[in-house]
Image (cartoon, rainbow, N blue to C red):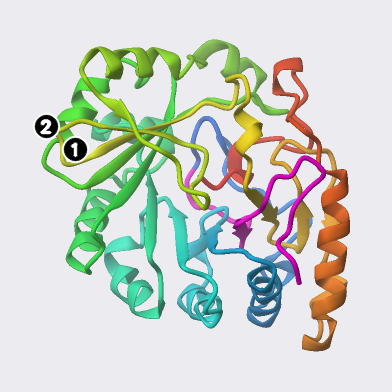
Amino acid sequence: MPQFTDAYARSFYYLRLSVTDVCNFRCTYCLPDGYKPNGTHNKSFLSLDEIRRVTRAFAAAGTEKVRLTGGEPSMRRDFTDIIAAVRENAAIRQIAVTTNGYRLARDVRAWRDAGLTNINVSVDSLDARQFHAITGQDKFAEVMAGIDAAFEAGFEKVKINSVLMRDLNSHSLSTFLDWIRTRPIQLRFIELMETGEGGDLFRRHHISGEVIRDQLLMQGWQRQPRGRSDGPAQVFRHPDYQGEVGLIMPYEKDFCASCNRLRVSAIGNLHLCLFGDNGVPLRDLLASDAQQNELQERIAHSLGQKKQTHFLHQGNTGITQNLSFIGG
C-alpha cells in the first residue's frame, strides 16, 4: 500500500487515535459541565482487536507515529494492552499519549514497558488553586508527582500542554520558563480555539500565540526545524534552558500547509480535519483481518475529500462542539 497522501501532496505519517470519549476532569474550555455520554457507553468504543486492525492498516500505509487520545485514555482499563497492541507494528516508531496525568504516577512504568515512547500531560497552570479552578479537580500534586514518575520510569522528555488563555495563564510565561530551566520538558502553549459550544469563552480568553513567540524571540529563544512526523508545534530552544517551548497556533496563515495528521474517533470514524463536518465510517471494515486492503482503500479514497485548510477564521467549527476531541 502506498503512503497515504491527499490531493495537495501532503503525506500522512501521524495518526491520532481516540480510544474513549470519557474524561474525569471538567476543564473550563473543554467539558465545563463534565462528560456526558451522549448515547455512547464504554462498550461503544473501539475494542482492542479493532484498535489493532486500524493501526495495522495505517502502519502498512506509511504511518510512523500514533498518538492515543481521548477523552482521557487512561480511563480505559485495558489502556496498557492498547499500547502493546499498537507496538506490534514495527513501522510505528513513536507511540504517544495525551493525558490529564491523574493516573500517571501509578501506571507510567507499565505504559513504558508496554511500548509507550512519548508523553503529553495537560497542565494549564502551575498554581494549584488555579489548576483546580480550570480543571474542576484538586489534583495538581498528583499530576506533578506523575510527571516526576515519568522521568523516573526512563522517559527523557515530557511534553506539557497548556491552553493559552488571556487573564488566566497568558501572563505566567516567566513562571513556566523557570520551571523548565533545569527540566527536559517541552512546554507547549496551545491557542484557545473557538468551538460550537465555546464562543463566549473564546471571545473572553483568546490570545494569539504570537504574543508568547515575540517574548521568546526577544529573550534569545530560537525556532527549531520540524520533523516529518512531528505535530503542529513551532518549537523553540534556548542555550540556558534544558526545556523547550512549543507554540500551536491554528489561526496563523499556512497552519494547514504542513498537515501530516489524520484522526480516528473512539467509535471508529476517520476525521480528515479536527474541524471538518463529517467523519468517514471505518468500523464496518474492522471486524476481520481479511478486510485490511478494503480498509486502506477506503481511507486512501477519502483523502481525496480533504480540504486545503480549515475554516476557523470564518468561524466554522464543524463537528467540534467542545475541545474534548482535540486530545492535545
Between circles 2 and 1, the one closer to the viewer is: 2
Residue 27 seen in the figure: yes
Residue 254 falls left or right of residue 167: right
Seen in the picture, residue 48 relative to 317 is either above or below; the reply is below
Q: Mark 2 points at which residue?
A: 240
**Whole-percent x, y for residue 124 in the image:** 37, 34
Report the front residue among 238 and 321.
238
Location of residue 256 (image quadrant): top right
Report the front residue among 37 and 301.
301
**Whole-percent x, y for residue 239 in the image:** 15, 33
Quarter of the image containing the N terminus?
bottom right
Residue at left offset 39%, top offset 12% = 211
Type of amino acid under label 2: Asp
Q: Name the residue under label 1.
A: 180
Using a 10 Å C-alpha cutoff, classify the residue at mark 2 as few (fewer than 14 neighbours), some (14 to 19) or many (20 or more): few
Seen in the picture, residue 228 relative to 259 is either above or below; the reply is below
Type of amino acid under label 1: Ile
